[in-house]
């Protein structure tokens, strides 16, 4: 069983944290991952910086740009992560756009991720059908899960199709806008969370975009299995550095 699947079976609401690899400093990646696991985070999404991000809000875009300026790239990230499984055991997901993967070679990329101990990918610009027809067999060969994003605008038919070809969780974007922290969720968002819950999908849902504190974490996980925090965490480590990560996580979980 994949580490993501094992984690999803735990009887608790899951907290996943996203950060851009190579931010704030190029060599912070491993230390951030270790500190996040130690502080009680359930899963980590490591952002592979890309120069033209589609779904990212200003905070994540800025951290991605800084990471690229710091010299972060696919080969360097793989080098940094090569011994990560000697130090952490929670699921690690790479989030990035399809182009860097394509340039590296999809099979070579998957093989490298398998060797490192990456558990899955979130690739916002890889259409579900293309993945299913052209790449799923490769991902499966290396034990890697592909996590799909859905938005309030995604039709039920399409959601059910994605659910049918998934073996991990469904990433629920809480609004169709780009990422960023919000103060709370209105009725529209809550109705959307409930609509998805009522579809009784086989894969659990984890909510991302707009979660920044304990209140939004609790709201987002009323109907969902977990929530993902990105922008708020990036702002925090940008301001506080990486030494106080446990305080950030503690404020959400405790």
Image (tube, rainbow, N blue to C red):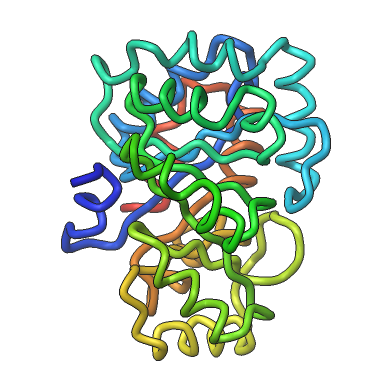
Q: Is residue 57 above or below residue 220?
A: above
Q: Is residue 231 above or below residue 206?
A: above
Residue at 43%, 20% (x, y): give it: 112
Quarter occupied by residue 168: bottom left
Q: Give percent across and percent down for residue 125.
A: 69, 51
Residue at 61%, 56% (x, y): give it: 130
User: Foreground residue, 234 or 168?
Assistant: 168
Q: Is residue 176 above or below residue 69?
A: below
Q: Is residue 64 above or below residue 200?
A: above
User: Foreground residue, 249 or 13?
Assistant: 13
Quarter occupied by residue 209: bottom right
Residue at 45%, 50% (x, y): give it: 136
Q: Is residue 239 visible?
A: no
Q: Give percent across and percent down for residue 94.
A: 50, 36
Q: Is residue 83 visible?
A: yes
Answer left or right for 96 relative to 214.
right
Answer left or right for 158 relative to 118.
right
């Amino acid at each position: 069983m994949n580490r993501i699947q094992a984690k999803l079976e735990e009887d608790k609401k899951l907290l996943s944290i996203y950060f851009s690899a190579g931010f704030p400093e190029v060599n912070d990646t491993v230390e951030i991952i270790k500190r996040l696991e130690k502080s009680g985070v359930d899963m980590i999404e490591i952002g592979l910086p890309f120069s033209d991000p589609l779904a990212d809000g200003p905070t994540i875009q800025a951290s991605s740009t800084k990471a690229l300026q710091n010299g972060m790239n696919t080969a360097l990230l793989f080098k940094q992560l090569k011994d990560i499984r000697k130090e952490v055991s929670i699921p690690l997901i790479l989030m990035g756009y399809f182009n860097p993967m394509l340039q590296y070679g999809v099979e070579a990329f998957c093989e490298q991720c398998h060797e490192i101990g990456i558990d899955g990918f979130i690739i916002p610009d890889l259409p579900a059908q293309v993945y299913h027809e052209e790449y799923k067999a490769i991902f499966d060969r290396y034990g890697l899960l592909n996590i799909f994003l859905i938005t309030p605008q995604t039709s039920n038919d399409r959601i059910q199709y994605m659910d049918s070809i998934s073996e991990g969780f469904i990433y629920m974007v809480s609004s169709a806008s780009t990422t960023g922290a919000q103060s709370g969720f209105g009725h529209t968002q809550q109705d959307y969370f409930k609509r998805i819950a009522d579809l009784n999908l086989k894969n659990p849902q984890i909510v991302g975009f707009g979660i920044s504190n304990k209140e939004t974490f609790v709201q987002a996980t009323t109907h969902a299995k977990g929530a993902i925090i990105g922008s708020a965490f990036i702002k925090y480590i940008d301001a506080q550095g990486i030494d106080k990560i446990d305080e950030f996580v503690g404020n959400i979980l405790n």
